[in-house]
Structure formats: C-alpha cells, structure tokens
Amino acid sequence: MTLRLRDVSKRFQTRAGEVKVLDGVSLEVPQGRMTVVVGPSGSGKTTLLRCVAGLEELDGGSVEVAGRDVTSLDPGERDVAMVFQDYALYPHLSVRANIAFGLRARKVARDQIDAKVEQAASMVGLDAQLDRSPDRLSGGERQRVALARALVRRPAAFLLDEPLSNLDAELRTQTRSQIRSLQRSLDTTTIYVTHDQVEAMTMGDSVAVLRAGRVEQVGPPMELYERPSTAFVAGFLGSPPMNLFPSRLLGRDGDQLCGVRPERVDLVATDDARLHGEIAAVEPIGGEVIVHVRVGDCTLLVRRDLRGVGHLDGTVGLGFGDDDLHRFSASSGQRLP
C-alpha cells in the first residue's frame, strides 16, 4: 500500500521565534518498499515520521496511506505502526503483554490476541522470552519486542525511528539484517529514519537525504552514491565521504567545486599526478588504509588496499580520471553537467 507525502510542512514556535522544521517535503514509498530517510541531527527526520503517524499536526501538505488521505485523522485511525528509538515498552508488563497491548486496546478477541502475539514473537525470535519483563532483556531483545508490537497489528505501513541507535556495533549489524529480512518477507511499506549513512545505503530500496527540512535528493542508494545531485549529498553519503575541493586546484577557473571518491584516487608518481600533496596521516582500517593528503588548504582522502601500500611519507602524487570527477556549483551546491 503506497505511502505518499505531498508538500508536508511543519513549524514550531520557540523563544527565538518561528522555526520551519519541514519545508515542503514530498515523498512516495511504493507498496512493499523501504525508503530510508537519512540526514544530520536537526534535519527534521523524526518530526517527519511523527507527522506521518499523526503525532504532530501539519502546517501544510497532506499524508496519504493506501490511497486514503489521513492528514486529519487521529493516530489510531491511520493504520500505521511506529517503532520508537527508546523502545517505549511498559516496564511493569511482560513481553507478551507489551506485544498484546495495542490489540487489547482495540478489543480484539482473546484467542486471536494469543495467536497473533505468538506469531509476532516467533518472527523476531522472542518465543522463549514472552513471560519475561523488559528489564530482564538485552537492548537488542527490547528492540525486537518493540518491532513485534508493531508487527502484531499488521499495519499498512511501518515507521521506524532510528531503531538501532541504542545498540552496540555488532548488535546493530545483526539487527539491521533481521529488520530488512523481516520487512521483505512481510512486504510492508516502510519509512526508516536514521542518521547513519551506512544503514541508509545497505537497507533502503530508496534513500531520501534530508537537510534543514528539505529533501536534497531521493533515489536508489547507488544512484545517490554515484551521481549525487548536490555537494551536500556527495559529502554526506560514503565512508569516508567524497573529497570536495575548489576547481582552482586543478587549474580551472569558475565558481565550482570538484569531487572525487576516495576509492577512485590513486597514489601515483609525481610526474603522472593530477595533484600533489603532503602525507598528513595514515589510518589502517582492517585490510584497507585511509591516507590523508594535504593539498594546499584542503585535505584529500585516498582509500587503498593495505597490501598495495608501502611506507608513506613526504610528497605524493594523486591520480584520477575525468570520469571519476564530479562538478558542483560552489555557490548553490547543485551538480553541474
């Protein structure tokens, strides 16, 4: 069931005056697909989810779920389920009761509740924890309880607000895979919010980059990575991010920024180099190394296989092809042809 946001706007009043948190956000998530909304802190990601869920009133625009305009409906009438960053579990209730809470509020028959709860718990691997209290669970298990509570309703759409941010790195990777697999098997339309661009690139059928309440770019993950529409998207997606530097370093005039991905830069003999710089730092990361090269007043990063890099020191040459070069307006940040 398709989820559509049309020109969604939201303002808050603060002591300093009115702040526009969302500024004409339009987004379409097709049936069964997952769109990941990614952006820095303060970009409006959580507010966007709360507007879809009905927890915040819109100042403009509309929200449609399965072809139905739900903009003026209460949260319980929208047929969406939201998973919060802090789990929002009831500490005095068992896992079973937490999962069943929404069904009981809707006065679903007891025998149906029991069957639905056991099915949802099985989906997320909580069969053996149903009679435990939340304080006896790990962070990953608590997150799965929150997921099961959303799953048990079988809503038209899932809304996930940074569900992995409270987990350690190993558990984040494991749970990320579980969530993606579960979403695909259920074929449920999903908006997943995160500040982690690795999560965005690995989980989303599409990625929407949000900046200061506006969508910078939306599309398949690799499309955003390989052809970013703005300098902000280029610098935000990727680990490490794209190198951005003024075109004058390449001897070009004009109001332009040039960009090249660290993995597309080679360390070459100075005679063959497009740029020359001084080694500033070398960071081994497993089987790879990130080389920081100071070029004028910019630092460019080079990502190379550790086995192919010897001792690095002093002046080096940097090589890359014209096909690897991206160009952006220095004033607007927009991609140039």
Image (cartoon, rainbow, N blue to C red):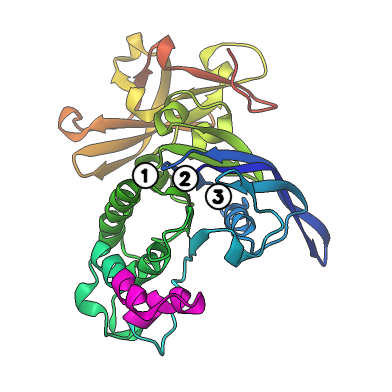
Outermost residue toward the left? 307
Outermost residue toward the bottom? 92
Disc 2 target residue? 36
Disc 1 target residue? 203
* Secondary element at image label 3: loop
**In this orientation, which residue lies closer to the viewer: 246 or 42?**
42
Residue 283: mark in rendering: none
Q: Residue at x 42, y 41 (%)?
A: 33
Dot 3 or dot 1: first in sequence order is 3
**In this orientation, which residue lies closer to the viewer: 302 or 335?**
335
Q: Quadrant of residue 222?
A: top left
Asked whether, in this view, residue 28 is left or right of residue 102, the answer is: right
Q: Is disc 1 surrounded by few (<14), some (14 to 19) or many (20+) residues within 10 Å?
A: many
Q: Residue at x 44, y 83 (%)?
A: 90
- Residue 328 visible? The answer is yes
Image coordinates for residue 173, horizontal then vertical, percent = 28, 54
Residue 242 versus residue 227 in the image, above or below: below
Q: Which residues are magenta?
A: 96-117
Disc 3 target residue? 40
Q: Quadrant of residue 262?
A: top left
Which amino acid type is shown beneath numbered disc 2? Val
Magenta segment: does it hold 156? no
Image coordinates for residue 149, horizontal then vertical, percent = 40, 69
Question: Mark 2 and mark 1: span between their CA atoms?
Answer: 7 Å
Count up the numbered dots. Answer: 3
